[in-house]
Image: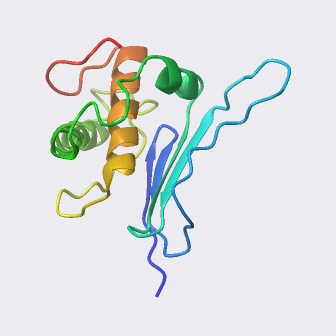
Amino acid sequence: MKKCISILIIALTIIACSTTSKNIASADTTASNKKISDTVRIANDSLEYEVIIIDNGFSTWLASRAYPRNYHSLAYLENKNNLYVTEWNSRVLQPQRYSPDLYEMSINYRPDIHYGYEVNYLIYNYMIYFQNTYKQKLWGYVPSR
C-alpha cells in the first residue's frame, strides 16, 4: 500500500512514499564552475520519507554554513523541529498577521513519527536558513550560521 503526504515550506516538501530508494543528497555540479543546485533531496527507504528542498541559496548555505551532521543529537533536532513547525503552523493560520507569501502551507510534522536523522537534519537546517534569510524568528535562539 502506497502512502503519501506532502508538505510545502515555501519550497520544502516532505513526501512519505513506499517507492523511495535510498539516502541521496543531490547536488548538481558542473565541471567548469562547480555550482551547487538549488535542490536538495534526501530519501530514506527504510523509513519511507523523503525531503526535497528547492530554495535559492539553501544548497550553498547548507554546504558552507550549516553545522555538520552529527553535531546535534537526533533528540535535539526532533525537539527543535517540533517547536519550529508548531510556530510555523500557527503563522499559516494567521495570514492577516504573517505574510502568506512566506507561510504558504501548514506542515504535517508529527513528533510521534521517527523520520530519522537525515530528514530531521535537513528540516532543522532549512528552518535556521529560513529564519536568517527572511528575518523571521519562529522560536527561541536562532544560530546565525
Q: For this rendering, which residue is in front, 93 or 81?
A: 81
Q: Please indicate whether residue 116 sits to the left or right of residue 5 in the image.
A: left
**How many discs appear?**
0
User: Residue 123 at what x, y percent from top left?
Assistant: 36, 41
Residue 106 seen in render: no
Q: Quadrant of residue 122?
A: top left
Q: Quadrant for the C terminus, please.
A: top left
Residue at position x 18%, y 56% in the image: 111
Q: How is the image coloured?
A: rainbow
Q: For this rendering, which residue is in front, 123 or 99?
A: 123
Residue at position x 17%, y 63% in the image: 112
Task: Examine the rendered structure and indicate whether residue 47 appears above or below residue 106.
Answer: below
Q: Residue furthest front?
A: 70
Q: Quadrant of residue 30?
A: top right
Q: Residue furthest right?
A: 32
Task: Examine the rendered structure and indicate whether residue 53 appears above or below residue 42.
Answer: above
Q: Please indicate whether residue 130 sits to the left or right of residue 81 in the image.
A: right
Residue 51 seen in render: yes
Residue at position x 43%, y 69% in the image: 48
User: Residue 134 at what x, y percent from top left?
Assistant: 41, 17
Q: Please indicate whether residue 106 sits to the left or right of residue 90 in the image.
A: right
Residue at position x 57%, y 22% in the image: 60
User: Residue 38 at what x, y percent from top left?
Assistant: 63, 32
User: Residue 64 at what x, y percent from top left?
Assistant: 50, 18
Q: Quadrant of residue 137?
A: top left
